[in-house]
Amino acid sequence: MIYLDNGATSYPKPRVMLAAMEECILKYCGNPGRSGHFLSIKTGEEVYHARKRIAAFFGIEKAEQLIFTKNTTEALNLGIKGLLRSGDHVITTSMEHNSVLRPLKSLEKFGITHSVLRADRDGLLTAADIEKTIRPNTKLIIVTAASNVTGGKMPIAEIGELAKRKGIFFMVDGAQGAGLLFRHGVPPVMMPRACSAQGAGWMPLDVAHMHIDLLAFPGHKGLLGPQGSGGLYASPRTALRPMLEGGTGTESKSREQPREFPEGFEAGTINRPAIIGLGRGTEFVAKIGVDVIARYEEELISYLDACLDEMPGVLRYGPPAGKKTGITLFNIEGLPAEEVTATLNNQYGIAVRGGYHCAGLAHKSIGTWEQGGVRVSVGPFNTKAQMQKLTDAVWQISSRQTRQNRLL
């Protein structure tokens, strides 16, 4: 199987991450804050080190402001619902995932309004576009770091500067931008003349330099951690309310939920083996370098895009490689996206994702509302040879469809 669905979850995982989780489960894995014995203390220390590693990765000065969650969806809900109050207004974009759009829709009944700024045909927009939508009661701007449909990178630094200047909270959905993937030890991909493409760019997320107040991120995608892990950074000025009440290991005599970070926002027993594994995955990515990761990923996707663009009957969507992460979205004329996805899986052993990617408004923005699209998302273990095999497969499928269309 050629795995090209890293936008959903990265696969496979680094051995150092797997080893860290196995060591935790087999050798200690107590419950910190609930007991004072060795296993509990050891687990607490390892979680602390993971929190520090991940905080450093995102430029978070105070690691305790990093809350662990089970995924980005939980983190987004915690940030959105923990911050907003009746009468507040929110600005977001048409390229957002349903994990942003659905919570905002549900808050309408509580007197919280929002504006959805429509992106252009490539799925992009500017900070100036957002500035035009600001109202006197705008409290929060929410923008994805990169679209999960097209990979298009949003101008996070510029929007952060705008939010700071206007005194508005800024939240970033880092599901597709919280870490960029790289295959260790693989030289840069050489671009053949027949499928040449150019581009450069890399996208680390730094909460301080980009003026990000709330950053939601997954552990299982770009950070190469396990599923069931993720987090939310909340700056001290956000004054969040906890969304989950229960045991924290602190203030046990009180019936009020503590609001201290991070314990007051991590009620119950959290997935500590996954958190420890996430810390090692993040360390793995940091040692390689985000710029190195981005260049490698861009070379792969540039090659693929250039080849797809040469095929009659194949439509590609979104910006060029230099303006996006390692994602390509395309369709074959006359074939539903899900059918192309199934054919690639069943006949060629290639795993991609077809459909609407939990982001219907994004598809409306780029013109794929009726049919969705086939998404290819590269990762650290992908190679140029795999891009060529995918290209050959798409060519064969599109050629068959072209012949069939002529017969009709």
Image: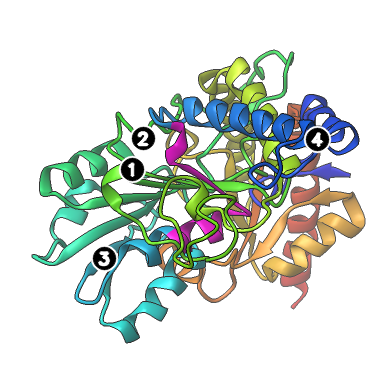
Residue lying at 38% horizontally and 27% vertically, measured from the top left? 61
Sequence-earlier tag: 1 or 3: 3
The local secondary structure at tag 1 comes to loop
Residue 30, by quadrant, is top right
Residue tagged 4: 21
Q: In the image, which is nearer the foreground, mark 1 or mark 2? A: 1
Indicate which disc, 1 or 2, sits on the residue closer to the N terminus: 2
Q: CA distance from mark 2 to mark 4?
A: 28 Å
First reached walking from the N terminus: tag 4 or tag 1? 4
Looking at the image, is mark 2 or mark 4 earlier in the sequence?
Answer: 4
Q: Position of residue 288 (x, y in %)?
A: 62, 17
Under mark 1, the amino acid is Ser
Residue name at image x 52 percent, y 48 percent: 263
Q: Residue 8: horizontal and vertical position, in percent? A: 67, 52
Q: Residue furthest front?
A: 253
Disc 2: which residue = 207
Residue at position x 50%, y 53% from top?
A: 251
Q: Residues within 10 Å of mark 3 (few under 14, many from 20)?
A: many
| Marks 1,2: beta carbons within 8 A | yes
Return the mark for residue 90.
Answer: 3
Work out whether residue 406 can be spotted. no
User: Is residue 67 covered in magenta?
Assistant: yes
Residue 113, visible in the rendered structure: yes
Q: Is residue 397 above or below residue 178?
A: below
Instruction: Say what secondary structure mark 2 lies in.
Output: loop
Q: Earlier in the sequence, mark 2 or mark 3?
A: 3
Between the C-alphas of marks 2 and 3, the distance is 20 Å
Per the rendered image, the range of residues in magenta is: 63-78
